[in-house]
Image: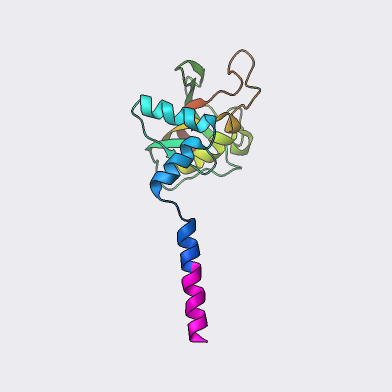
Amino acid sequence: MNTVVKLICVSLLLALGACMKNSDDLQQDARMDNPSSSAIQAYLDAHNETAIRDVSGLYYNIIAPGDSVHFVKATSIPTVIYTNRLLSGEIVGTSLGATDFDQRMLKNHIPGWQIGLQKISQGGKIRLYIPPSLAYGSTGISGVIPANAILISDVELVSIR
């Protein structure tokens, strides 16, 4: 019986080892994932910037983590200072000061913000590289954000209600 258990354990370890990827493979997967991921990675490389890739496809760079006490939830109303721009550098939205978007809960913001703002706490700052699937998708916002646009959002989480 003991030999059978050992054989099963060894077999499982070998199977898991065969499924694991090294970090070079994971980086290659991130680049080949989709055109948006490749475009974001190319932008980061060209601008000598680094970012972490979330499993959702969102890339982010925490500039300041915040107070590490007050975190936003889906039902929180975040007050932020933000600037949204395209990969070209064109600014397509800015708060010009703190805003809570008429008391909009986090769950009612674009998915990129829903994911990204939960990575910092009150007082924190984050740069989000948001693929279209987590922003305005294939429709965009007429006259403001083109269809399939990747957004770069610089967001400061001023306060939470």
The image's colour scheme reads rainbow
Residue 147 in picture, x, y percent from top left: 61, 21
Relative to 109, say whether 15 is above or below: below
Residue 152 in picture, x, y percent from top left: 47, 26
Residue farthest top in this picture:
143
Judge whether residue 133 can be spotted in this image.
yes
**Residue situated in front as seen by the camera: 129 or 123:** 129
Judge whether residue 155 can be spotted in this image.
no
Relative to 149, say whether 112 is above or below: below
Residue 9 covered by magenta stretch: yes
Q: In the image, which residues are magenta? A: 1-12
Relative to 31, say whether 55 is above or below: below
Residue at (53, 30) in percent of width and height = 36
Residue at (52, 75) in percent of width and height = 8
Specify whether 141 is left or right of 64. right
Q: Main secondary structure of the magenta part?
A: helix
The C terminus, quarter of image = top right
Residue at (59, 43) in percent of width and height = 74
Residue farthest bottom in this picture:
1
Residue at (59, 36) in percent of width and height = 111
Specify whether 36 is left or right of 45. right
Residue 83 in picture, x, y percent from top left: 47, 23
Residue 97 covered by magenta stretch: no
**Residue situated in front as seen by the camera: 48 or 22:** 22
